[in-house]
Image: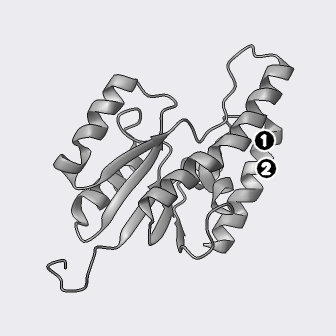
Amino acid sequence: MEPNGRGRKPRVLLIGPFYSPACYGGAVQVYHQMFSRLQRLDATVVSQWLGCDREAAREFDAGCERLYGYRMCRIPRYELIFPSGASAPRKLHDAWRFFRDTPGHLRAVIERERPDAIICGATIIAGWLMSRLPRHIPRINYLHGEELGRLSTSRFVWRYLFRTQLQAIREA
């Protein structure tokens, strides 16, 4: 029994593709400060390995619960970014693997963590996954100004991500 007398702490999962130590911007600081201060939550941030120095990320993740009161978990990536100079067949293969594998990585985390609520902290990047989440888990979406004009992938994929972002917002 928790000190508040109401049983276990609510479990919250934050889908935060851009997170420390790879990113240190305003959105990251909002989530970090929120979870550092909301000790009534049992929180886990699910970020990505993409763009991270593995050693620095492992060090940050290992101390996160002890230092800040929330856990870190990483999946390979949330964002589809093609290497510069990649051929069209390579891009197609990479996109196919990305859209095939990423939902499974996130589902495995959800099954392990069993959250009471899921917060999507980067809807333009991870919003496409929201429709693939269990419907019984409440969802919260955060939008940040930089997401609305962001075009980090092909125009075709960006259009799909934008449509799914709008759908995720309507369903949250």
Tell me where residue 131 sits by quadrant. bottom right
Out of 139 and 163, give the one closest to the viewer: 139
On the rendered structure, is 54 left or right of 35? Answer: right
- Asked if 170 appears above or below 76 in the picture, the reply is below
Tell me where residue 69 sits by quadrant. bottom left
Q: How has the structure been colored for display?
A: one colour
Q: Position of residue 3 (x, y in %)?
A: 14, 79
Q: Residues within 10 Å of mark 2 (few under 14, many from 20)?
A: few
Query: Quick one: SS at disc 1?
Result: helix
Q: Position of residue 96 (x, y in %)?
A: 78, 36
Q: Residue at x 26, y 38 (%)?
A: 62
C-beta proximity under 8 Å, tags 2 and 1: yes
Q: CA distance from mark 2 to mark 1?
A: 5 Å
Amino acid carrying label 2: it is Tyr
Name the quarter where the C terminus is drawn: bottom right
Q: Residues within 10 Å of mark 1 (few under 14, many from 20)?
A: few
Q: Residue at x 63, y 51 (%)?
A: 124
Query: Quick one: SS at disc 2?
Result: helix
Farthest residue in the left direction?
3
For residue 122, say whether it is visible: no
- Asked if 59 appears above or below 37 in the picture, the reply is above
On the rendered structure, is 103 left or right of 74? Answer: right
Amino acid carrying label 1: it is Val
Residue placed under numbered mark 2 in the picture: 160
Q: Position of residue 136 (x, y in %)?
A: 58, 76
Q: Residue at x 34, y 60 (%)?
A: 43
Residue placed under numbered mark 1 in the picture: 157
Farthest residue in the bottom direction?
5
On the rendered structure, is 144 left or right of 79? Answer: left
Out of 47 and 154, give the one closest to the viewer: 47
On the rendered structure, is 23 left or right of 17? Answer: left
Q: Residue at x 40, y 45 (%)?
A: 73
